[in-house]
Structure formats: C-alpha cells, structure tokens
Image (cartoon, helix red, strand yellow):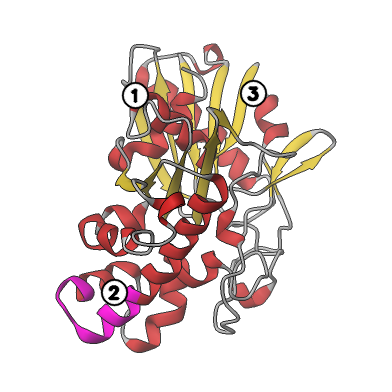
Amino acid sequence: MKACIDIGGTKVAVSLSSGAGLELLARRSEPTGITGRNDALAQQVLRMVDAACIEAGVAPGTVQCAGVSSCGPFALRDGLLELAAPNICGGIAGPARGLPNDWKTALLEAPLRGRFSELRIENDGIAALEAERRWGALQGFEHCAYVTWSTGIGVGLCVDGRVLRGKHGNAGHAGHMFVSDNNDALCGCGNIGDLEALVAGNAIARRFSAQGYPDTATLLIAACAHEKGAVAIVDELCRIMGRALYNLVVILDLQRISLGGGVFWSHRDYLLPRLQAQLDGRLAALTQGVTLVPAGLADKVGDYAALALVA
C-alpha cells in the first residue's frame, strides 16, 4: 500500500493506492493547515495518512512509500525541501496578504522522511503533468503543458518528451510572471501585478468583492448569466490568462495544453473558448493547431498526480 498526498493552497487530500490501476482507497480531504508552528502542515499530512490507513484496515507502519504532489515553490534547506508557497506562508508577503502565520517556509520533507522510507515530492504542476501524460489528455504528446487555474496558478512543462524540473524542482512557476503594473493585485509572494495576483481564485475574491463578487463562483455564475459587469471582468481575466498560455506556447513550441483546477473546471465550457481565442490567429507558425483542452482526469487530477509519483 502506498500513500498519495496532494497539498494545495486550499486543501490537503490523502488517499491510499494498492497498486491496482487507478483505484484510490480511504480518500479524505481537509482545509490546508496554516496556523501554529511551521511544521503544522507536515503533521497534518502524517495524521491524515495514519487515519486513512486505519479506515482501510492497514497498519500505518506498513505504509512506507509516499508520493507528494504539492504547491510550491520549494526551498532547499540542508538538502531537504521546504515549502515557500505564497498561499501558505504568510511571512513571505507580510501582514498585508492576510494569512494567519509568519512562516517564511513550511517544513515538508524532513518530517515526512522520518515517517516514510520511500518518498517522492514534486511540484503539483509537474506531478499533474505526469498524470495527464500517463492517463489523461496529454497521452502521446511530447511538447505539452498542464496548467491549473485554481487557488493559485500551477504549471507543468514537457519539451522533447522531457519534463522540465529546474534546479530545485520549481520549473513551471508561470503564475509569478509579471504581466501588469496593476497596484491592487498583491500576490502572496510579495509581487504586485503578477499573473497569480491578477487571476487566481484567491485574487478574484480580493480584487472584486467590493463590486459584489465575494468569490470566484459568484463571479462566474453571474458571467454565465450574461450579467454585464461580470462578463467584462471575466473577459479581462481570460485575456490575461490566455496571453500567459500564449506565451508558454510560443516560448516552448508546444502542441497542447491541458487545463484543470477549481476556477477553470466548474465553468470550463464558458472559459475554454475565451482562452483559446487568445491563441488563435496569432503567429500561425507557432500557434496553428495548438489546442487548449480540459484535463482528461477531470477534477481528480490532484489525486492522480500524487499517484503518478509512486505508480
């Protein structure tokens, strides 16, 4: 039995795999722990894994292999990965970001190494990319990307059949590209006007609540109902997000991008053509035939991303 762990800015999900295909057992989900000491998140993960084992009738000590798909970026301390995730660590951008901690990093690998003898940790964009290439909408593609539009913006990149990882496993943090000088858009990383600060799920709530849209769902439901103000906001969000996708395509010469995440998935039929329109007709030598598609693993991408690391 293997543990599959998905750490996001909003929730942590844990399940077990017996190795029998895509079946996941004893799945559980909790809001991401962001209070207390900076090992609180790691301790939450360990507690959830043990609870899943008990539910599945497995002695916790026998589960010694774990795959961790986690939001990032990662920082390296004494050769071990820690999270420097803007949506989790409040000490990065400071009190203005509103997170209830002053962590600069959150411990991750060190506590988990003390529990598991086999452990693989990857950025969630990279892990989801591997899952989509193995079982989802990117099967057979050697020049592709997976992009999650969710609490944050996560990206996994593959060129010439090789997954790009970078020096600390942080390749693909396109959410922190500067795309605007907009001074109302403070990212948890401290940047003002980067992609994540403008269009991510938590940014939408911060930027547009005064206009009557306290969360992403309210805004998108209103846009789908053709409410003029909401349509204008969502069109601008899609222009910004779509241009970021265009940039990835032309920089890396991609064939296909698979899209998932909570913001995108719930309203994918409305958002997808608006995003595709930012690619179509622009520099045909690089964009002709490039398609944006919904994730083949649907809203289970996070679960299967962790599984892909240990399967």
**Cβ atoms at labels 1 and 3 below 8 Å apart:** no
Amino acid type at image mark 3: Arg
- SS for callout 2: helix
According to the picture, the residue beneath numbered tag 3 turns out to be 115
Amino acid type at image mark 1: Leu
Q: Nearer the viewer, mark 1 or mark 2?
A: 2
Crowdedness of circle 2 by 10 Å Cα count: few (<14), some, many (20+)? many
Q: Is residue 116 visible?
A: no
According to the picture, the residue beneath numbered tag 2 turns out to be 219
- SS for callout 3: loop
Direction from residue 184 to residue 287 in the image, left or right: left
Q: Position of residue 200 (x, y in %)?
A: 46, 64
Q: Name which residue lies at 35% across and 61% down.
A: 281
In front: 237, or 70?
237
Direction from residue 114 to residue 58 in the image, left or right: left
Direction from residue 84 to residue 275 in the image, left or right: left
Amino acid type at image mark 2: Leu
Q: Earlier in the sequence, mark 1 or mark 2?
A: 1
